[in-house]
């Protein structure tokens, strides 16, 4: 889908020029940061380093689900690599993570005619008995339709066929649908994949069983298959579905958040934190979700180190473990760093894919928002200077809420949810120049916030 030219180095010159010419509408104080910002941008845009590093991760370790050997091998590699970059205080922080395994799985129409469905079991789902489960299909398009079906749900395989609007809205059918249908006696749940129509790709993702409700197996099917089943039901055809899943939980596994720093030269205890989550689903290579977010955040520190830029405050990168099916890494960080959360000046997370960066989402005081908006003017040359309403991230969330820390996320322009949690989440969907732009944008923002004399408040 993103067939862009790979090595376009020409724009570097234009960026350098536009950065060196102060804009009439910029705040005067920002002029002191034009030189380091131009150097960070120049260094990032001159190479494909970030993209090559992300490609290496996907090619070498593949996807990285919590509890997997590939995640732990990737973590070990990242520690060694951060040290090689010259980052300081590089270490891991232990986290016990859930260990869910998918196993073999399939879903098919068995009547009126045998046809396989393109499916992926939902993360955290229980498996089926060895022989699978079977039931007549009932399709609903909302929770209201489910509740209206009442006793007709009993013994059925329920399909939630709810077209994608936005993630927050549509994902509730994946998260809560299985327990809602189980409460009415369904034997299994299928969910229309949470994403726009693609090339008949199912999207996995976590479900959340309600406390005390019966647990039934659940899987996502492609939007195309959901549309087909809908047409069949609309014609009055009785469709019988067979679902087989070996999914199960093993005992919790050992994992780690990875931490590296550039220690602040004057106020090392004050921390500007940048981050992404290193775990992924067990499909594709987790390149956009969220290997890319990890690499561009990490890259901000590598660039500073390379250019000998040591800001006043500490800049810390964290590669979180277990965002996808537990957020245990985020909770462990909040608890472990409880006493120093008050020294966190800003927490940043990139977890929306790395496509062309347009700026940042920010949550904090009006004064802090004004400051951040002035800093973003340094990114006009790469059109990444827009500050939008909310800074958020599943991994920074617990700490941000615990200590009321200003929060920031990377805003990008790309079709993230087309490949999100699918086998198509691979490096070829990512433009090397976008990786460089994102790295530069994060580096400039983090550097100025860590360097400016007064603390962001
Ligand atoms: Zn993610």
Image: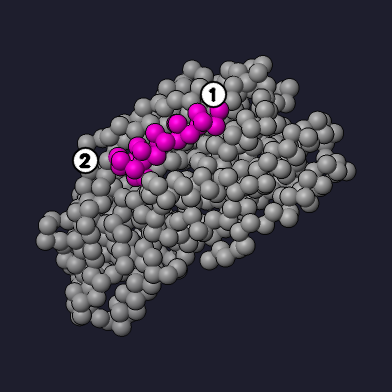
Q: Which residue is mark 1?
A: 88
Q: Position of residue 204 (x, y in %)?
A: 35, 56
- Image disc number at residue 250: 2
Earlier along the polypeptide chain: callout 1 or callout 2? 1
How many labels were placed on the picture?
Answer: 2
Tell me the residue at 61%/43% (across/down). 439
Left or right of 436? Residue 58 is left
Residue 440 visible in rendering? yes
Which circle, 1 or 2, is nearer the viewer? Answer: 1
Q: Where does the C terminus fall, quadrant-wise?
A: top right
> Dots 1 and 2: beta carbons under 8 Å?
no
Tell me the residue at 73%/37% (across/down). 39
Query: What stretch of residues is rendered in magenta?
Result: 64-86
Q: Position of residue 165 (x, y in %)?
A: 49, 62
In depth, the one of 80 and 241 nearer the eye is: 80
Q: Position of residue 308 (x, y in %)?
A: 67, 28
Task: Label 1, secondary structure: give it.
Answer: strand
């Amino acid at each position: 889908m993103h067939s862009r030219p790979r090595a376009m180095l020409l724009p570097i010159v234009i960026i350098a020029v536009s950065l060196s010419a102060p804009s009439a509408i910029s705040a005067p104080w920002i002029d002191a940061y034009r030189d380091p910002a131009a150097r960070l941008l120049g260094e990032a845009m001159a190479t494909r380093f970030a993209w090559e590093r992300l490609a290496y991760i996907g090619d070498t370790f593949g996807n990285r689900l919590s509890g997997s050997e590939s995640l732990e091998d990737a973590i070990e590699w990242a520690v060694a690599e951060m040290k090689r970059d010259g980052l300081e205080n590089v270490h891991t922080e232990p986290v016990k993570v859930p260990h869910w395994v998918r196993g073999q799985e399939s879903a098919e129409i068995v009547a009126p005619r045998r046809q396989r469905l393109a499916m992926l079991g939902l993360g955290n789902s229980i498996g089926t008995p060895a022989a699978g489960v079977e039931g007549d299909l009932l399709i609903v398009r909302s929770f209201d339709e489910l509740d209206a079906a009442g006793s007709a749900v009993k013994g059925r395989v329920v399909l939630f066929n709810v077209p994608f609007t936005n993630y927050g809205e549509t994902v509730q059918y994946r998260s809560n649908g299985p327990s809602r249908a189980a409460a009415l006696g369904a034997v299994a749940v299928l969910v229309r994949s949470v994403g726009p129509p693609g090339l008949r790709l199912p999207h996995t993702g976590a479900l959340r069983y309600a406390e005390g409700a019966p647990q039934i197996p659940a899987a996502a099917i492609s939007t195309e298959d959901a549309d087909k089943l809908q047409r069949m039901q609309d014609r009055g055809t009785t469709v019988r579905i067979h679902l087989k899943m070996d999914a199960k939980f093993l005992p919790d596994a050992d994992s780690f958040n990875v931490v590296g720093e550039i220690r602040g030269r004057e106020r090392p205890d004050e921390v500007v934190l940048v981050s992404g989550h290193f775990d992924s689903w067990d499909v594709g290579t987790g390149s956009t979700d969220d290997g890319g977010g990890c690499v561009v955040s990490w890259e901000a520190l590598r660039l500073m180190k390379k250019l000998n830029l040591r800001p006043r405050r500490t800049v810390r990168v964290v590669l979180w473990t277990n965002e996808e099916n537990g957020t245990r890494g985020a909770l462990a960080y909040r608890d472990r760093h409880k006493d120093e959360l008050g020294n966190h000046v800003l927490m940043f997370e990139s977890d929306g894919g790395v496509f062309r960066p347009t700026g940042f989402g920010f949550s904090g005081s009006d004064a802090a928002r004004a400051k951040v908006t002035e800093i973003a003017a340094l990114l006009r040359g790469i059109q990444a200077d827009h500050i939008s309403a909310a800074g958020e991230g599943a991994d920074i969330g617990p700490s941000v809420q615990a200590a009321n820390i200003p929060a920031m996320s990377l805003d990008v322009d790309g079709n993230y949810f087309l490949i999100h949690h699918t086998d198509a989440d691979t490096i070829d969907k990512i433009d090397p120049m976008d990786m460089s732009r994102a790295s530069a944008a994060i580096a400039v923002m983090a550097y100025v916030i860590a360097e400016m004399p007064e603390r962001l408040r």
